[in-house]
Image (cartoon, grey):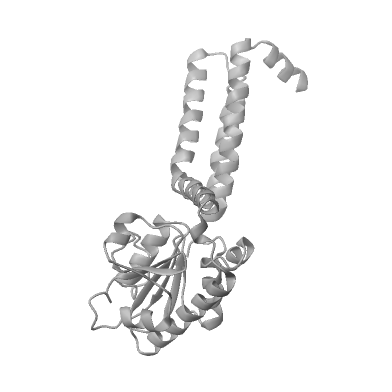
């Protein structure tokens, strides 16, 4: 077998050999990307089938003599690799976007707020959510280091310190801003009454209304964003991050999520909370 492989490589021209080596490197990158993102989507079996096809086609291309057959094999390999990139392109874009945000935030002194101030803000948000929950008052709070100018300007700029009283007032049913979202950035209530993109997902619980869909939508569009929702119908507190959902939150769970959102916890804590499942 080894002798057969050696002869196969020796019969290849330098150009053909270089082409196969480059393609092997490319296929290896696709392989690792497939399994990395497939694990997040629970698509390991599907990915294993695709990778098996890629390896089989790649190996077969060494042993066929027909140039026409080699062309079709290489074309099928290219199609499989391109489909892999397209399948996980959204996940790849999110990771690139997240890395760019981290790089930007390191150079932006406004996000470097004292731990004591951040902890106080977390306590105020928890206090407001618990009070709003008791009165079945709907609320949507988005904590993020980055938000598009269009979303911020769809509401009213506030630029105020985070207090439970302010949040309760903004979501009071008689106020003109209560239907929109409150955006928290750099430990400030940046804007209120903002309109957010709604998720188009169909497999959501029936009781999810516009606020929940908006929360999932914004957390999917902005991977660093965490959205907290208080249901107007049930008073249930939920959280959304990177398109994932946590429901029926108690005080301890809400604090853990807010600590991550405000940068008071490390990435391992975020992984423990959100895990790798989508819902």
Residue 214 in percent (x, y) is at 33, 65
Q: Decide which of 175, 211 is in the foreground and name it.
A: 175
In the image: residue 44, left or right of residue 248: right
When asked about the image quadrant of residue 168, the answer is bottom left
Q: Decide which of 233, 51 is in the foreground and name it.
A: 233
Q: Looking at the image, which residue sits at the far front?
A: 109
Q: Looking at the image, which residue sits at the far bottom?
A: 134
Q: Is residue 65 above or below residue 86?
A: above
Rendered residue at 51%/72% (across/down) = 258
Residue 187 in percent (x, y) is at 47, 68
Q: Is residue 173 visible?
A: yes
When asked about the image quadrant of residue 184, the answer is bottom left
Residue 62 in percent (x, y) is at 61, 20
Q: Is residue 42 visible?
A: no
Q: Is residue 208 above or below residue 84?
A: below
Rendered residue at 57%/13% (across/down) = 65
């Amino acid at each position: 077998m080894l002798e057969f492989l050696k002869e196969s490589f020796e019969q290849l021209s330098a150009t053909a050999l270089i082409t196969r080596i480059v393609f092997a490197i490319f296929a290896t990158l696709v392989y690792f990307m497939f399994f990395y993102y497939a694990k997040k989507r629970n698509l390991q079996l599907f990915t294993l089938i695709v990778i098996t096809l890629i390896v089989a086609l790649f190996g077969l291309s060494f042993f066929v003599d027909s140039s026409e057959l080699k062309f079709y094999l290489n074309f099928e390999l290219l199609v499989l690799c391109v489909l892999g990139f397209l399948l996980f392109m959204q996940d790849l874009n999110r990771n690139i976007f997240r890395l760019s945000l981290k790089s930007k935030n390191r150079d932006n002194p406004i996000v470097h707020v004292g731990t004591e101030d951040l902890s106080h803000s977390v306590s105020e948000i928890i206090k407001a959510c618990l009070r709003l929950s008791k009165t079945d008052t709907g609320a949507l709070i988005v904590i993020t280091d980055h938000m598009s100018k269009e979303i911020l300007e769809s509401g009213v700029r506030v630029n105020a310190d985070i207090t439970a009283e302010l949040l309760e007032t903004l979501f009071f049913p008689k106020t003109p801003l209560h239907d929109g979202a409150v955006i928290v950035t750099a430990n400030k209530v940046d804007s209120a009454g903002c309109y957010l993109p709604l998720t188009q997902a169909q497999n959501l619980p029936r009781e999810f209304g516009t606020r929940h869909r908006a929360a999932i939508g914004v957390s999917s569009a902005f991977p660093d964003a965490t959205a907290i929702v208080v249901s107007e119908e049930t008073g249930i507190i939920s959280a959304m991050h990177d398109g994932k959902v946590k429901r029926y939150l108690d005080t301890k769970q809400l604090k853990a999520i807010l600590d991550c959102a405000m940068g008071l916890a490390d990435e391992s804590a975020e992984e423990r909370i959100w895990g790798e499942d989508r819902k």
